[in-house]
Amino acid sequence: MRAQYTTQLKYRKRDAKGDYCFGHGDDDFLFGLDAMRQVLQTRLAAIYGEWWEGDPTAIPYYPDVLGVPATGANKDAIDLMIIQRIMDTVGVNSVSKVESSYDGRHYSFSCTVNTVYGETYAEVNL
């Protein structure tokens, strides 16, 4: 059982290009469930080895995802990698309604995520 949170999550907004928003005080932040959705999007977008000071737990999308044969076993392994990344996020309780597809060149994943702030979704499209 995960701990219950009494404080509200606050997370900096990102614009349409993925850049952090600055200069507008609290208008540049998301709170609660909206913040949790942004946390999940940010964590799932982190690519292992993308940046010299990157997250060592980020998903190795290239070549470990988009570089392996499109078999059912490989798709399941990729799904599990992403589900684990989501479950390792502070405030996440469970993942359900997982849907994914993989043809060797394109991978898509979506799921419902139950968090301490409510229910949201997460998705990956490569």
Image: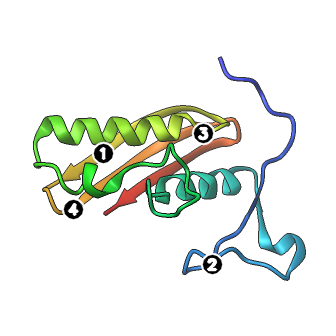
Q: Which residue is mark 3?
A: 89
Task: Give amino acid for label 4.
Answer: His
How far apart are the alpha carbons under marks 3 and 4? 25 Å
Q: Which residue is found at the position 16% from the left and 34% from the top?
A: 73
According to the picture, the residue beneath numbered tag 1 turns out to be 99
The image position of residue 100, as x and y in percent, is 27, 48
Residue 15 numbered mark, or none? 2
- Closer to the eye: label 3 or 1: 3
Q: Mark 2 against mark 1, which lies toward the viewer?
A: 2
Contact between labelled residues 3 and 2, with CB atoms less than 8 Å apart: no
- Give left or right: position of 37 versus 27: left
What's the CA distance linking mark 3 and mark 1?
A: 20 Å
Three-letter code for the amino acid on which mark 2 is drawn: Asp
- Could you tell me which quadrant the C terminus lies in? bottom left
Vertical comparison of 59 with 81: above or below: below
Q: Residue furthest front?
A: 52
- Which badge, 3 or 4, is on the more N-terminal residue? 3
The CA distance from mark 4 to mark 1 is 14 Å
> Residue 72 in the image: x percent, y percent?
13, 38
Is residue 51 in view from this perspective? yes
Instruction: Give yes or no for contact between labels 4 and 2 (Cβ–Cβ under 8 Å).
Output: no
Residue annotated with mark 4: 106
